[in-house]
Image (tube, coloured by chain):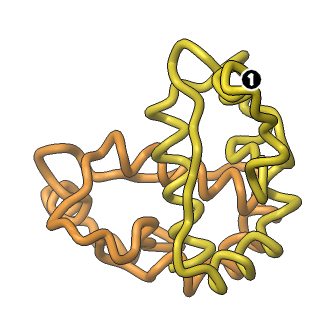
Chain colours: A yellow, B orange
Amino acid sequence: KYGDSIVDVSERLAQNLRKSSRVLVLFGSPREGLRDILSRESLELSRVTDYVVNTIPHQGTETVRTEEALYATLAILNLLAP
Amino acid sequence: KYGDSIVDVSERLAQNLRKSSRVLVLFGSPREGLRDILSRESLELSRVTDYVVNTIPHQGTETVRTEEALYATLAILNLLAP
């Protein structure tokens, strides 16, 4: 939900993905968002990542289940950098 | 798994989706693929659809669960025509 809409960053993200040999994707947990998890480690989301992306824009719900976010995100990454 | 790879048709599909006021997406069932379901009704997949798309190219498994295909497909449609 937070971060840039995938619609806005998809082209730039696709280019970077194709240039990358390894990709690390972070998800929040069912109980806690990424920001909260990182803040316990005194880390800031924007400083430890290249992209913070909302892969389900216009989602219409308060939160998305982690397992749904996982399928949605992997499907989009697979499309952008097959 | 069957059909055109989403990577190949995504641009054309995105254009058509944006022009459409309604979209119908068909999925196979856990027990039976779309082709089999339609053949019982004497219908042919290519004749009743505009696109037959594999939304999970390079999937590496024999089949994908319907619920996984659903999340993957909706995520991609949401990206292509937000």
Q: Amino acid at mark 1?
A: Ser
* Circle 1 residue: A39
Q: Which residue is at a point 45% across and 66% down the rendered structure image? A: B55
Q: Quadrant of residue A40?
A: top right
Q: Which residue is at a point 83% across and 49% down the rendered structure image? A: A5
Q: For label 1, count other residues whose C-alpha is less than 10 Å away and answer few (under 14), some (14-19) or many (20+).
A: few
Q: Quadrant of residue A15?
A: bottom right
Q: Chain of mark 1?
A: A
Position in image of residue A43 (x %, y %): 76, 33
- Dot 1 falls on a residue whose secondary structure is helix
Horizontal arrangement in the rendering, residue A76 relative to residue B66 (left or right): right
Front residue of B56/A54: it is A54
Position in image of residue B62 (x %, y %): 15, 67
Work out whether B19 lies above or below B4.
Answer: above
Instruction: State the quadrant of the N terminus of chain A.
Output: top right
Q: Which residue is at a point 51% across and 18% down the rendered structure image? A: A30
- Residue at the far top: name it: A31
Work out whether B35 lies above or below B37.
Answer: below
Front residue of B22/B78: it is B78
Front residue of A3/B11: it is A3
Position in image of residue B75 (x %, y %): 59, 50
Q: Which residue is at a point 34% across and 77% down the rendered structure image? A: B58
Position in image of residue A31 (x %, y %): 54, 12
- Residue at the far front: name it: A42
